[in-house]
Image (tube, grey):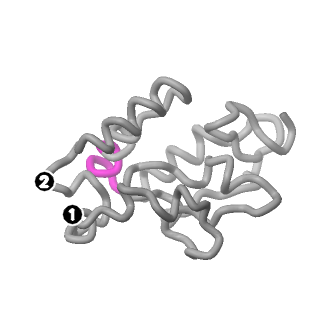
Amino acid sequence: MESVNSIETTLIAPCGMNCGICLAFLRDKNSCSGCRGDEASKRLSCAKCSISNCEFLKTTPSNFCYDCEKFPCARLKHLDKRYRTKYNMSMIENLNNIKKSGLDNFVQNEQKKWTCNTCGGTICVHRGFCLKCN
């Protein structure tokens, strides 16, 4: 079955979040462009994100947190704990997978993991189901 939504490498945030599975990105109305997308379409919380606006992140060669000398910092640990607890997903694990296997391999695995078996749409990490077919 062909996927309705494809996850691009540009949708992987510096913290390891896959913006392509985020509710703000997937919704039809006032959709977000992702952490690396157009500033005008970002949610305010994303635009003011302390991780993506981190001064250390800007000095990393990859522009991912795993290259930072403070990895994982307190901010990332807090975000990771919240997502592991609420959504069964780890930003730190994502970053370690990107560092180990490369961004393209990570995105391919994410595509498989988050594709709806029923309609080929994308499963939303925040809802736990496909927004196209429920």
Q: Quadrant of residue 29?
A: bottom right
Residue 69 image position (x, y, % from top left):
13, 53
Packing grade of label 1 (10 A; few <14, some 14-19, many >=20) is some
Residue 100 in magenta?
Answer: yes
Which picture quadrant has residue 127? top right
> Is 36 colored magenta in this rendering?
no
The span shown in magenta is: 96-102
Looking at the rendered structure, the kind of residue marked 2 is Glu
* Mark closest to the chain's N terminus, 1 or 2: 1
Asked if 93 appears above or below 42 in the picture, the reply is: above
Front in this rendered view, residue 93 or 36: 36
* Residue sitting at x 26%, y 70%: 58
The residue wearing badge 1 is 56
Percent position of residue 64, x then y: 31, 59
Q: Is residue 55 left or right of residue 38?
A: left
- Left or right of 108? Residue 42 is right
Q: Secondary structure at mark 1?
A: loop
Query: Which mark is on residue 69?
Result: 2
Kind of residue indicated by mark 1: Phe
- Mark 2 element type: loop
18 relative position to 51: left or right: right
